[in-house]
Amino acid sequence: MIFRTRVRRIIITSLAAFAVGTGVTSLSLIAVDKFSVKNGVGGLETAGVPEFKESDLDRAEALSSAGELSEISADFVSDAGADNLDSAAAVYSQDSSSEELELCYYTYRVKKGDMIGFIADSFNITQDTIISVNNIHQSRLLQIGQYLKIPSMPGIIYTVRKDGETAESIAEKYEVSAEKCARVNSVAVSAKLPAGAAVFVPDAQLDWVTRQEINGDLFHKPIRARYWLSSYYGWRSSPFNGKRSYHSGVDMACPTGTSVYAALGGTVTSAGFNNVYGNYIIITHHSGYKTLYGHLSAILVTRGQYVDTNTRIGRVGSTGMSTGPHLHFTVYKFGKTVNPLGLWK
C-alpha cells in the first residue's frame, strides 16, 4: 500500500514538474509568449523521457497544489494515449475560458492517424483556427511529427493589408466582436494598425473558397474514367531531350477519345491550337483561378461559353508535343501555377 501510494505520488508530481518545465527541454504543448506576427506525357511543359530529482518533485507538487500550473506537455500526452490527450484538452479548455481573454499558444506534435478536425475538437477550437494559425495550404498533407501551434481560443490570423486598419474594421469584416478582438491583441478598438501586422481575430472563420481549396475539395478531376498519372507537377527530365525542366501541371494518361470535363465552373476564355499543347482549352473561374486542358483530340466548347463540372469540354488526344494519348491539366492561381493534386476531390 505504501509502495502504491508512492508510485501514484511520483506520477502526479512528475506530470506537474513536466508542465512547469523544471529542468526539462519541452518539445510539445509548451505555452509560448502572448500573441505578437514513357508514354502519355507532354513536353516543355525526441527528447527522451525527462528525469527528476526528489527536490524537483516536491517543488512541482507544491506549485500544483498552489494552482500555478496551467499547461501540460503534449509529448507526455501523445505518447501515453488518447485518454491523456483528452485530459490535456480539458486542462487547455479550462484555461482558455479565462475572462481575461489572454491569448497564448501551445504546440502539439502530430501523431499517426491525426486529422485536423480531430485535433481541433480535442482542444475545443475550429479547423479554421489550426489551418490559419499554422499557415496550412493543404490539410491532406499533414505530416507525422509535424508541430502545430494551438491557440487558447478559436479564431484566425488576419494580416493587415494597408496602414490604418483597426480592430473595429477587421472585426466588421468577419462579423465578430470588435471589443474582444481589441482586448485579445492588446490594442484600442480604434487604434490604427500598420500594414503587415498579424492580428488574431477571435471567433472568425475562413471564407468558403479558402476552406475548400485547403481541404482539397475545390476542384473535380477532369477525367472521370480510369487513368494513371504519367507525369507529376514540378521538376522532371524532359521526355524529348532529357533536360531538366519544370512541368506546369499533371499528365493524366488514358485512351484517345476519353471524355474531359471542366474541373470547376467557369467561362471558356480560350480554345484553339498551339505547337506545345496542341488542341487546348482555358477556363476562367472565380477567386483568381484558371485551368488549362491540353493535347486534346477534340474541343467540344467555344469561347465565351459557361461550363460547369458536368460539362464535357473535350476528348483526350495526343496533339502538340506529346508522346502518347493523355490530358495535360494545369491550374493557375492569379497567374501562377499550383499543384492540382492538392486541390481536387
Image (tube, rainbow, N blue to C red):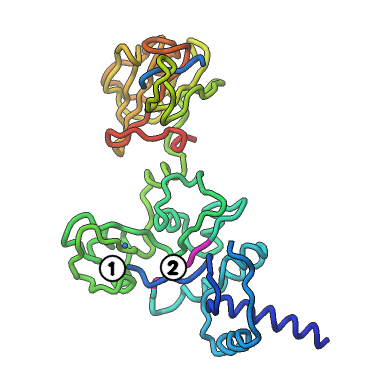
Q: Which residue is mark 2?
A: 105
Q: Indicate the position of residue 107 as horizontal and vertical percent values.
A: 49, 64
Instruction: Please give the name of the residue rendered at 47% of the width and 55% of the height, measured from the top-left corner.
Output: 127
Count neighbours of disc 2 (C-alpha within 10 A) and say few if under 14, some if 14 to 19, many if 20 or more: some
Q: Is residue 322 visible?
A: yes
The picture quadrant where one finds residue 237 is: top left
Q: Which residues are magenta?
A: 103-108
Q: Indicate the position of residue 253 as horizontal and vertical percent values.
A: 50, 18
Instruction: Please give the name of the residue rendered at 32% of the width and 36% of the height, measured from the top-left corner.
Output: 333
Instruction: Please give the name of the residue rendered at 62% of the width and 88% of the height, measured from the top-left corner.
Output: 55
Q: Is residue 15 above or below residue 325?
A: below
Position of residue 328 in the picture relative to residue 108 (left or right): left
Tell me the quadrant of the picture where the N terminus can be found: bottom right
Which circle, 2 or 1, is nearer the viewer? 2
Q: Where residue 178 is drawn, which disc sits there?
A: 1
Q: Is residue 193 above or below residue 128?
A: below
Q: Is residue 40 above or below residue 193?
A: above
**Mark 2–mark 1 distance (CA, rounded to whole Å):** 21 Å
Numbered label tally: 2
